[in-house]
Amino acid sequence: MKIKPKIQPKRRYLMDTPKTPKAKKPIPTRVDANGQSIPVSIIRPEILKQDSIVTKTINRAIKLHDRIVADKNQFFEDVELYLQQVAEKNGLDWKGNAVLNSFDGKYRVEIRFKERIQFGIELQLAKQKIDECIKAWSADSNVNLRAIISEAFQVDKKGEIAKYRILRLRRYNIKDQTWKEAMELIDQAIQVVATKQYINFYERDESGQFRQIVLNFPSL
């Protein structure tokens, strides 16, 4: 009986797989004020520390600012809603300023509206009539009043007049027809260009006086 020779299994030769080159790690950089990317390795440690502190501080400040603005808007909304509800009970719409106190008198909320005005071309016509009055009045007339009137139309370094001085002229009861016409022109010249809301908070201190809780809302 013949013995069959053992068949050796064919060897499989594995081809060497080419190694993939490792990707280089990106070099950490920071963008400077000129928009250039600067490697972190060449930036002085104290500069990096300063950058970290400034960035962290500003991010916190931005979040705080956004929260304060949101709270400010909510304060106005809550107070205005209450005032409107009170007015509606009496068949009215709420307009104007208001002062609200807590039941124990310890706290106070004050809401005010302030109009920002400018003057139209009628103001120049009013000035012409006022100049006529000053020329017509005798030299022995009230010198102080003449000085106040003349000063009212003086401009500052920015070339602007002080609005309160112009408005103050209307308080004088001068029996002169030309003067009255000038005051009517000032009334016509007043233009309301914007209305700004203010809300203030107060707490009564130990002496019984109200102390304002300063939040500097008008600048927000």
Image (cartoon, rainbow, N blue to C red):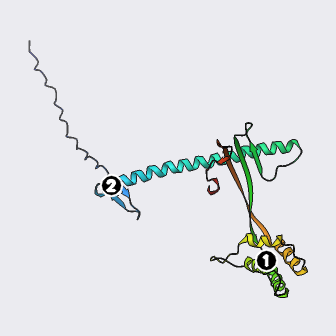
73 in relation to 172, above or below: above
Q: What residue is shown at x 73% (from left), y 71% (from top)?
A: 163
Q: Identify the mark nearer the N-term, 1 or 2.
A: 2
Residue 90, located in which quarter of the rendered image? Answer: top right
Which of 175 and 62 lies nearest the eye of the viewer?
A: 175
Give how far across and how far down residue 32 sits, in percent: 39, 61
Q: Residue furthest top?
A: 1
* Residue 24 falls left or right of residue 84: left
x then y, percent, for residue 175: 90, 77
Q: Are marks 1 and 2 in contact (CB under 8 Å)?
A: no
On residue 33, the disc is none
Marks 1 and 2 sit apart, C-alpha to C-alpha, by: 60 Å
Q: How would you rate the neighbour count of disc 2 (Cα within 10 Å): few for under 14, some for 14-19, many for 20 or more?
A: few
Depth-wise, is mark 1 or mark 2 nearer the camera?
1
Q: Which residue is mark 1?
A: 123
Residue at x 81%, y 52% (from the top left corner): 95
Q: Position of residue 65 (x, y in %)?
A: 56, 50
Q: Amino acid at mark 2?
A: Glu
Which residue is disc 2 drawn over?
A: 46
Say whether residue 37 is left or right of residue 205.
left
The residue drawn where x is 82% and y is 79% is 126
Q: Residue at x 70, y 79 (%)?
A: 154
